[in-house]
Image: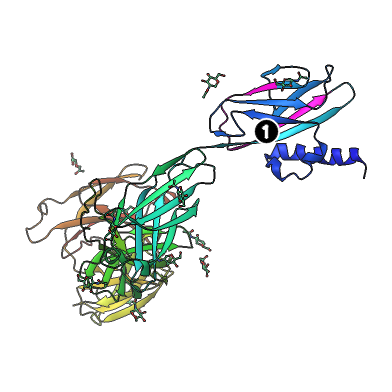
């Protein structure tokens, strides 16, 4: 391999590197091909945000050549020629932690690499803060953690000093760039108060934490609980978690977190039903949940030490999260009653009468799954008939003395509350009038019937519209405060049939037309 091919290969590597900001130090070939060197003021390791001056020195004096620099791939336009071998480049306010400066010498016939230099920016460490230590009952280690504050971009050393109360050091731990450390527990006496001081240091400075009081017996976290059982309350979206723990303290508060589909955990404020039973509300139907629990204890206040400025730790001591338990919530059963109406035929000679029970489909948002069937019950709770899910009416034959029925929709996840079908007829006539187009209908009570007797309460009106005989019956429930309505939808496309308006009171329904 010729020298020039080495140079060109390295230049390609360097070009790639200057695009990707890859540290120059890792490019193995740069020494072999340089034709000069770079120096930086104040230094190649500098305080972030500083103004830097970089000198490009070439080995040979060549007045005809041009010396240029690129910083992270971008040309540097502020420069000064010092003499025939040296050019001074100004790099203002560098906030990038790792930059690469590359110097080139261009003459008429070729461009040569002079050299490259890594520029490292960093910051002094912040004061280590929120120092917490904890250990488990049976653990031989104490885990301490702290917050480091702002990123320093530089190797930062943490000295963790464990001191006696009088300030004399027992042990010093050192760790690079970390925010936690484990301390052997046997090193410390369980009942003695110690002071922990953490000192952070790097090229740009040193920062010391406030001393923190540590007494091993005060930092023992509770053992994790175990979730024994999850039960979903029937038809409500709440789960009851039964849990157990080896901890005997009465001051333990359970906490629950949950997630679905391995998404992020969500903390839930549970309702404590009793010891070892907690309820979580506001769940969704038909969803697989993953639950975890922990228990927390309020740490006893630590004894104050002689050293002023030291405040006792009052943080919560929480156990680790329990193992997960998964369970899928059940579907929702209907909460609403069916809207019902009925058509009572005249009594036959056999003392029976034919009744058609009519209902509206349940709103789909009120239940999950599907409707399996509709069940009609007698007053005494005995099932009279099962009607198919596809229909919204059902005919039954009844002795004349039966005065009411009830009907429930049976769905995949439960029954709707029974809706009363009142068969008793009140005999009160409501007189409807339709306008010419039969779109607007109003009605009035026959004289003498209004207001109703005290024991009867108007609940709602039902407007019926029979089309061509045999083509079925349309009906619609209307609020009791109306005395007119506009007919919309399907009804208007059908020819006008018999129109009637009925009242439903607390114990009877009027049937004028039957
Ligand atoms: C950096 O240089 C600019 C002018 O180029 C000056 O305004 C600024 O104060 C300098 N910053 C420092 C930290 O010296
Ligand atoms: C050019 O200037 C630099 C820096 O001032 C100096 O070190 C170097 O000796 C000078 N070179 C010549 C040839 O004058
Ligand atoms: C302490 O840290 C170790 C290792 O990181 C871990 O295994 C252990 O569970 C931790 N103990 C506590 C009480 O946090
Ligand atoms: C950290 O500990 C080392 C080893 O004892 C010591 O040399 C160094 O000065 C300490 N650093 C600080 C900032 O205290
Ligand atoms: C602190 O106490 C320990 C033991 O109680 C003792 O050995 C040490 O000399 C004391 N140091 C100071 C500075 O008082
Ligand atoms: C710590 O103190 C308790 C009483 O406060 C005592 O029962 C126990 O033996 C002491 N433990 C040690 C290791 O000194
Ligand atoms: C309770 O302690 C026993 C023995 O120490 C252990 O086997 C068991 O797993 C613990 N149970 C819980 C819920 O922590
Ligand atoms: C969970 O995942 C299933 C399929 O893996 C998906 O159908 C469903 O929408 C997801 N639910 C959520 C809340 O992301
Ligand atoms: C969630 O993650 C666990 C383990 O990683 C996996 O067994 C399970 O199938 C995942 N569940 C979903 C819904 O992605
Ligand atoms: C359930 O969630 C809704 C909104 O998502 C919220 O307004 C309501 O307070 C929650 N109820 C409970 C008992 O957490
Ligand atoms: C009731 O309906 C059945 C069959 O639909 C019919 O045979 C019977 O005559 C009807 N009874 C009366 C009283 O209308
Ligand atoms: C309907 O009620 C309104 C007031 O609520 C009344 O003015 C109007 O006369 C009533 N119409 C009929 C037909 O009863």
Q: Under tag 1, what secondary structure?
A: loop
Can I make out residue 348 in this image?
no
Q: For residue 410, what is the image quadrant?
A: bottom left
Residue 500 drawn at (x, y percent):
28, 55
Instruction: Give the residues in magenta.
Output: 88-106
Tag 1 residue: 72
Q: Which of 276 and 382 is in front in this view?
A: 276
Could you tell me what secondary structure mostly forms the magenta stretch? strand
Q: Nearer the viewer, residue 495 or 109?
A: 109
Give the residue at x 44% y 69%: 390
Number of numbered discs visible in the structure rendering? 1
From the image, which quarter does the C terminus lie in?
bottom left
Relative to 431, 19 lies left or right: right
Q: Which colour scheme is used?
A: rainbow
Q: For residue 162, what is the image quadrant?
A: bottom left
Can I make out residue 384 in this image?
yes
Relative to 479, 15 lies left or right: right
Is the residue 464 above or below the residue 188 in the image? Answer: above
Residue 316 drawn at (x, y percent):
28, 59
From the image, which quarter does the N terminus lie in?
top right
Relative to 175, 162 lies left or right: left
Classed neighbour count for the residue bearing mark 1: other residues with Cα under 10 Å, few (<14), some (14–19), many (≥20): many
Q: For residue 75, what is the image quadrant?
A: top right
């Amino acid at each position: 391999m010729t020298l020039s091919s080495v140079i060109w290969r390295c230049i390609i590597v360097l070009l790639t590197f200057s695009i990707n900001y890859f540290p120059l130090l890792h490019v193995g070939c740069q020494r072999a091909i340089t034709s000069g060197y770079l120096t930086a003021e104040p230094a190649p390791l500098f305080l972030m945000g500083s103004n830097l001056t970089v000198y490009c020195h070439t080995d040979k004096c060549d007045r005809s050549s041009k010396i240029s620099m690129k910083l992270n791939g971008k040309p540097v336009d502020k420069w000064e020629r010092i003499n025939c071998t040296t050019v001074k480049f100004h790099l203002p306010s560098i906030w990038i932690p790792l930059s690469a400066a590359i110097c080139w010498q261009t003459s008429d016939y070729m461009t040569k690499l002079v050299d490259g230099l890594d520029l490292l920016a960093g910051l002094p460490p912040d004061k280590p803060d929120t120092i917490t230590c904890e250990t488990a009952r049976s653990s031989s280690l104490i885990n301490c953690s702290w917050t480091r504050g702002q990123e320093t971009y530089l190797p930062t050393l943490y000295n963790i000093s464990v001191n006696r109360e009088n300030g004399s050091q027992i042990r010093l731990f050192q760790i690079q760039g970390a925010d936690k450390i484990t301390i052997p527990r046997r090193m410390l006496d369980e009942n003695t108060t110690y002071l922990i001081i953490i000192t952070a240091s790097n090229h740009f400075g040193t920062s010391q934490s406030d001393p923190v009081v540590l007494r091993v017996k005060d930092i023992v976290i509770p053992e994790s609980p175990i979730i024994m059982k999850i039960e979903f309350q029937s038809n409500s979206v709440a789960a009851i978690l039964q849990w157990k723990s080896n901890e005997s303290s009465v001051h333990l508060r359970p906490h629950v977190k949950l997630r679905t589909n391995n998404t992020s955990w969500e903390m839930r404020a549970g309702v404590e039903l009793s010891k070892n039973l907690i309820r979580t509300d506001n769940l969704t139907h038909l969803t697989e949940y993953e639950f975890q629990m922990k228990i927390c204890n309020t740490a006893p206040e630590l004894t104050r030490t002689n050293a002023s400025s030291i405040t006792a730790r009052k943080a919560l001591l929480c156990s680790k999260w329990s193992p997960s338990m998964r369970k899928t919530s059940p579907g929702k059963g209907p909460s609403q009653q069916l809207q019902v109406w009925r058509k009572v035929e005249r009594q036959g000679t056999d003392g029976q009468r034919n009744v058609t029970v009519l209902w509206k489909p349940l709103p789909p948002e009120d239940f999950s799954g599907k409707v399996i069937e509709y069940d009609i019950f007698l007053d005494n709770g005995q099932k009279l008939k099962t009607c198919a899910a596809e229909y919204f009416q059902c005919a039954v034959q009844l002795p004349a003395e039966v005065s009411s029925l009830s009907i429930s929709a049976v769905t995949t996840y439960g029954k709707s509350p029974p809706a009363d079908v009142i068969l008793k007829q009140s005999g009160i006539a409501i007189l409807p009038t339709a306008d010419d187009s039969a779109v607007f209908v109003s009605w009035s009570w026959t004289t003498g019937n209004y207001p109703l007797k005290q024991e009867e309460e108007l609940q709602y009106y039902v407007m019926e519209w029979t089309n061509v005989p045999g083509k079925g019956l349309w009906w619609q429930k209307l609020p009791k405060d109306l005395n007119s309505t506009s007919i919309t939808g399907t009804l208007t496309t059908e020819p006008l049939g018999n129109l009637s308006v009925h009242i439903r009171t607390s114990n009877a329904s009027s049937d004028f037309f039957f």
